[in-house]
Image (tube, helix red, strand yellow):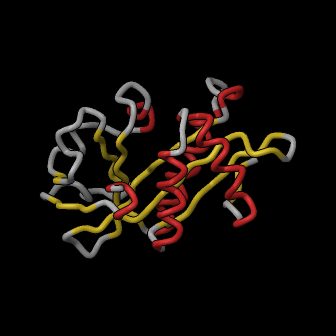
């Protein structure tokens, strides 16, 4: 089952994220995104009422009136990795991002993983951001033409720290 995150989930999400990434850097980003009000939404996947995965979408600041989102982080409990949870959370998150009105989503993620969901370096070619030069920086337009014009985006402060 996939559902929206509740405040009572935060400690378990931090533990899942720390285990998935081998340390607290990503869970500290989550904490800061929440504190700063930059989180658009978060989803968790549950198995037998236990959180096995988590995905976060935060807002990006753009030189446009359109809403753009960042997908990060995506965390799956290590004993549940490679069983499809990341894909289920990503697809559900992208559907919800579109419902939230996001025109496009950016991700700084594994170049072999995210293209299966439609993310590409080509889609991010006109996007200027602190991560633009990284081969891990990819984008996905959720609305036709959302990435056809040059766009400058800024990530929330949580990603800088």
Count numbered badges in the picture.
0
Q: Nearer the viewer, residue 149 or 135?
A: 135
Residue 120 coordinates in the image, percent (x, y):
30, 37
51 lies above or below 150: above
Q: 128 left or right of 143?
A: left
68 lies above or below 43: below
15 lies above or below 97: above
Residue 17 coordinates in the image, percent (x, y):
59, 42
Q: Nearer the viewer, residue 26 or 77?
A: 26
For image coordinates 48% across by 60% down, the residue present is: 97
Q: 110 left or right of 39?
A: left
Residue 32 coordinates in the image, percent (x, y):
48, 63
Q: Nearer the viewer, residue 54 or 142?
A: 54
Residue 49 coordinates in the image, percent (x, y):
85, 47
For image coordinates 14% across by 58% down, the residue present is: 149
* The quarter of the displayed image where residue 15 is located: top right
Q: 91 left or right of 69?
A: right
For image coordinates 25% across by 62% down, the residue present is: 154
């Amino acid at each position: 089952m996939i559902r929206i995150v509740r405040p009572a989930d935060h400690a378990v999400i931090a533990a899942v994220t720390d285990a998935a990434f081998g340390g607290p850097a990503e869970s500290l980003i989550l904490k800061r995104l929440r504190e700063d009000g930059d989180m658009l939404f978060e989803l968790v996947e549950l198995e037998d009422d236990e959180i096995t995965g988590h995905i976060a979408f935060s807002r990006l600041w753009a030189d446009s009136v359109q809403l753009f989102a960042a997908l990060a982080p995506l965390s799956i409990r290590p004993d549940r990795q490679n069983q499809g949870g990341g894909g289920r959370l990503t697809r559900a998150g992208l559907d919800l991002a579109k419902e939230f009105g996001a025109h496009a989503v950016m991700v700084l993620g594994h170049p072999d993983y995210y293209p299966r969901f439609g993310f590409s370096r080509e889609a991010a070619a006109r996007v200027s951001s602190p991560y633009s030069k990284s081969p891990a920086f990819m984008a996905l337009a959720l609305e036709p033409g959302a990435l056809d014009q040059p766009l400058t985006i800024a990530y929330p402060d949580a990603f800088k720290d």
